Amino acid sequence: MAHVVHIIPVLAPGGAENQLVTLACGQRAAGHRVEVLALTSDPRSSNELEAGDCRVISARGGVRRFLTAYWRSRRADIAHAWMYHGFLLALPLRPFGRAKHVWSIRRTNPRSSGLSLATRSVIATVRTLARYGAHALIYCSGAARREHSRAGFAHPIEVVVHNAVPDGLFAVPGQVAGGADESRDNVAVFGCLTRWNPDKGVDVVVEAWRRFLDAGGRGELVLAGPGMTAANHELQALIDDLAADTRPRLTGATDDVAAFYAAIDIYVSPSRTEGFPNVVAEAMAAGRAVIATDVGGTREVVGEAGTLVRSEDPEALAAAMVRVAGDATLRTTLAAEGSARCRRLFRTTTMVERTDTVYELVGVTPSAPTR
């Protein structure tokens, strides 16, 4: 089996970071030798990796130990770097070892207005060095590949490997909870698990919620994730004009996403841009009807098993919320089809197998003995 070293600047709970953990643990279960190098690491992510028998080395645990492991990683079969800053971190190893370098690109739009000037500078650098620094590029969606190509990224080996939904989030086949109980007279609980960033469209879902209520809709909107608290004064200003009993419930960050999905009926994604929207796939896998803006890789996730609307169109989003909330049969159908689609396309084993094909393309046979 292959010796794989994953390289990432910050290892903490987050979309791309969680996918690293999922892939690394899946690779270890498949027999690979797996290490993860990070400048800083959150105990939650480190503990999950170590529980999966993956070795984690962080500079926070000792700079000398980290540098030693970093230098030795040039002898691995694969140096798998994550996100733009991770590519820079891995780059110095490229001339000195036998490791094949694979870069995982997790965003859709490298020209997004939500990016800082520093991040834009890093993107410009890695775009120029991609052909030299990487033996292959992995994109999380076809949309991400297309947008990066338009931005000047080019490489002879570019492969789309979709993200995976953790096995524990899948609804049991035949027991999908398709939405609000009809006994509640179509009072639906909508949920959005996100973070405070212009790209995530929180302002859009709040305006859609206002229009949903104006149209006579009944229900509750739950906003969860970093920044989704009353302490966020910008968010509070968006909802202050709503009656107290109709304001979105702000629950903040959560470590128990399974409980979040279990507590809602319909998932709403109002994003302006997405690479591969993990939360949309998770909600579908958990057996929840999904309404999402048609951006980035969202269509690749949803297919025909959800409701897609135009980006930055609160009126269209509100209309979809009214329609799905008022049709229990539709909710049940979407929930069942969505869960089945995710079970078919977005399992950890599928992600591991697809990643192995990339390793094979750069000359590493994963089934060969580790050197």
Image (cartoon, helix red, strand yellow):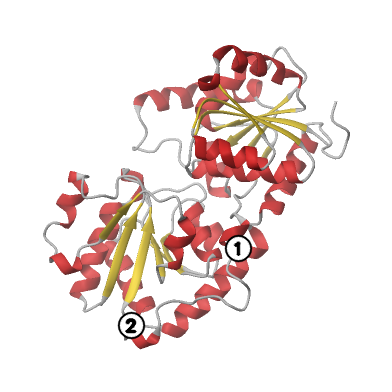
Q: Residue at x 61, y 19 (%)?
A: 91
Q: Residue at x 42, y 61 (%)?
A: 260
Residue occupied by mark 2: 186
Q: Is residue 261 above or below residue 140?
A: below
Q: Earlier in the sequence, mark 2 or mark 1?
A: 2
Q: Is residue 11 above or below residue 162?
A: above
Q: Position of residue 208 (x, y in %)?
A: 26, 64
Callout 2 secondary element: loop
Q: Residue at x 53, y 32 (%)?
A: 83
**Number of dots carrying numbers:** 2
- How crowded pointer 2 is (Cα within 10 Å; few <14, some 14-19, many 20+) is rated as some
Quadrant where the N terminus is found in the figure: top right
Q: Name the foreground residue: 57 vs 176.
A: 57
Quadrant where the C terminus is found in the figure: top right
* Mark-to-mark CA distance, 2 and 1: 26 Å
- How crowded pointer 1 is (Cα within 10 Å; few <14, some 14-19, many 20+) is rated as many
Q: Position of residue 227 (x, y in %)?
A: 30, 45
Q: Is residue 199 left or right of residue 329?
A: left
- Residue at the outermost right position: 369
- Tell me the amino acid under the disc marked 2: Asn
Residue occupied by mark 1: 342
Q: Position of residue 53 (x, y in %)?
A: 70, 39
Mark identifier at residue 64: none
- Tell me the amino acid under the disc marked 1: Cys
Callout 1 secondary element: helix
